[in-house]
Image (tube, grey):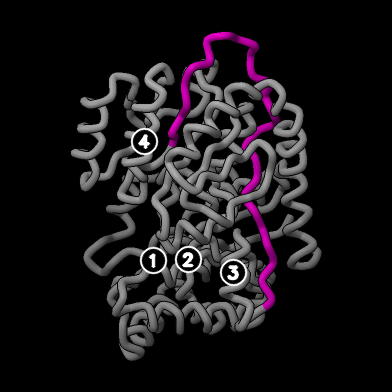
Amino acid sequence: MSQFVLFSKTLWAEPPRLRHQFANMLTLYGNEVVFFEKPRFPYQTAEMDRERFPASNGNIIVAQGAQIIHHQLRVFGALSQLNAAWEARSIRKAAKALVGESAIVINFNYDYYFLRRVFKFNKIVTVINDDFIAQAKFFARRHVKARLRETCRMSDTVLTVSYPLMAQLADWCSPVLFLPWADCEYRAPSVTKARNGVLLWGHIDRRIDFELLSLFSEQRPGVMVYIVGPVSSDVEGQLLLLKQQRTNVITLPPTQLDSLPLDLFFAAIIPYKKNVGDIEAVTLSNKSFQLMSRGLPLIVHGMPSFLEHEAVFKCASALDAVVFADRARECFLLLQSAIRQLIQDNQVESRYEQFRAAIGDF
């Protein structure tokens, strides 16, 4: 058994993301994970936070460091260095009783360049799964780029989840493509004539192209559009208006995928707006294989670098979404063989072996 120390800016109890999936993959193969979640501020206490999430989960131990300046506010080098010293000290203190000398560090944070000060002789693997430069406020982009560069350079291995991100990082390191993987084996969908719906499953926020959804639901009034997931407050009005204007739009609160009426859907749709930097960097969203493992083809918009596959329909316009939805519906059963093979090739076993090959045996 090996020990891994994983650093993230999310809480363990938040809805699962790649970092949670990563931790579970490592424990599945008998390893132990110390999961350092989002660091707390001085006015927060570990005891107060512990009321909101479990202290451990099997071979996963939840730990937490401390920060004094929010990462979006560290726009000057002095502020970054001050916070780095504070975080490094808090991590060193928390890790003393939890982390062994041979532990391998898995870092999901773009600005944790200071980890080498804490883990001087440990192997450090950084995973870049977002375009942090594109996400940054305009005034903070120089700072974000500098911290990202330092973090990559101090890492022994850098994994990333898309081709655009590989190109972005190539001047500082030799990144390895490491895509998300399926959460289960392929499940053959039932043969039914009742498939007259598309599924939008995920966070509903300002990145969603509501104009596309409006045109699609208008052009295909017989196709039910299920929109399922948490809704950001700044788009609640747009979603309500869409639902009022289109009787074939159905909204549901956050729901587990297998709790939805999957027999109703002939495709999943991921309709992001065009020209959104961090979205254009996506080669494969974390939910993609989850949807495809249930037999659903994907209709995607706003992601020109998305995975090329015959069951992935990449749209350049709202009208493309209509045309490709018709094609996905017509070819739904014919596409299952290709979807099955894709899911079989991207199970946790193959990704774990890829991880071992990328960082060296442990």
- Residue beneath label 1, please? 135
**Proximity of marks 4 and 1: CB atoms separated by less than 8 Å:** no
Q: Is residue 268 left or right of residue 217?
A: right
Work out which quarter of the rendered image holds the N terminus and state it: bottom right
Q: Position of residue 84 (x, y in %)?
A: 40, 81
Please rate how many residues cluster around mark 3, counting C-alpha atoms within 10 Å: few if below 14, some from 14 to 19, many from 20.
Answer: many
Q: Position of residue 238 (x, y in %)?
A: 23, 39
The residue lying at 67 percent from left, 48 percent from top is 308
- Residue beneath label 4, please? 213
Label 4 – label 1 distance at C-alpha: 24 Å
Magenta range is 174-201
**Picture quadrant where residue 242 is located:** top left
Q: Position of residue 8 (x, y in %)?
A: 47, 61
What's the residue type where badge 1 is placed? Gln
**Proximity of marks 1 and 2: CB atoms separated by less than 8 Å:** yes
Please rate how many residues cluster around mark 4, counting C-alpha atoms within 10 Å: few if below 14, some from 14 to 19, many from 20.
Answer: many
**Picture quadrant where residue 79 is located:** bottom left
Mark 1 secondary-structure assignment: helix
Q: Earlier in the sequence, mark 4 or mark 2?
A: 2
Label 4 – label 2 distance at C-alpha: 25 Å
What's the residue type where badge 2 is placed? Asp
Label 1 – label 2 distance at C-alpha: 6 Å
- Residue beneath label 3, please? 126
Label 3 – label 1 distance at C-alpha: 18 Å
- Residue beneath label 2, please? 131
